[in-house]
Image: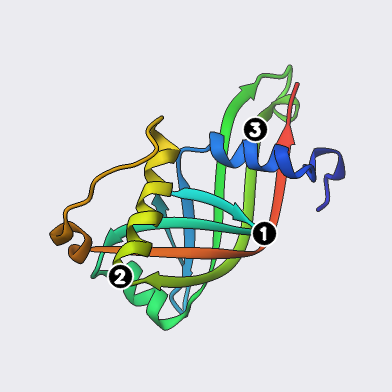
Amino acid sequence: MRRKEREVTDESRIKEIILACGTCRVALNTGEAPYIVPLSFGYEENGGLRTLYFHGAKEGRKVELMKNNAYAGFEMDTDREIVEGETACGYTAMYKSVIGTGSIEFIEDTDEKRRALDIIMRHYSDRETFEYADEMLNLVCVFKLSIKELSCKEHRK
């Protein structure tokens, strides 16, 4: 990382920044150019492993790309604020961001899908558990990204 003074290495701070983000952008490989899709997500740490959970339609470009290449990049950010300067080069931005890469796996087991969906829902609510109709679980695609590499930056005033 070029700007070492902005690097965040404290594990609890990284988790705090991830949990403050509302959207995770996943970059998939098309063979020609990246395909980036913004997604709702859930985050879990377990035994030193970091995992992002997502859901979506069972068909479409995103699913086909993941089936063809299960390795992806991701980006999320929060608290963006432009700080004006006297000149154009004096402008800057305050932000917190996380980028990384990892491998994608589809979740097929119904109980595992419920658990993953609960993790996603907890990211956006104060509730702990949720109910899912079996027919809905059969219709939804749930997948996880096991994080292999991660870097976190924060630029504050």
Q: Residues within 10 Å of mark 2 (few under 14, many from 20)?
A: few
Give the amino acid at mark 1: Gly
Mark 3 or mark 1, whichever is nearer to me: 1
- List x then y, in percent, for residue 138: 19, 66
- Viewport quadrant of the C terminus: top right
Query: Mark 2 or mark 3: which comes first in sequence?
Result: 2
Q: CA distance from mark 2 to mark 3?
A: 31 Å
Q: Is residue 22 visible?
A: yes
Looking at the image, residue 67 lies above or below residue 76: below
Name the residue at 74% across, 26% down. Answer: 156
The kind of secondary structure element at disc 2 is helix
Residue drawn at 47 percent across, 58 percent down: 26
Label 2 sits on what residue type? Arg
- For disc 1, the marked residue is 47
Which residue corresponds to mark 2? Answer: 61
Foreground tag (2 vs 1):
1
- The tag earlier along the polypeptide, 2 or 1, is 1
Q: Is residue 137 left or right of 151 when viewed as pictured?
A: left
Residue 94 position, x and y percent, is 67, 28
Q: In the displayed image of the protein, which residue is found farthest to the right?
A: 5
Q: Quadrant of residue 116?
A: bottom left
Label 3 element class = strand
Q: Residue at x 39, y 51 (%)?
A: 39
Left or right of 136 in this view: 116: right
**Dot 3 corresponds to which residue?**
95
Q: Is residue 14 above or below residue 103?
A: above
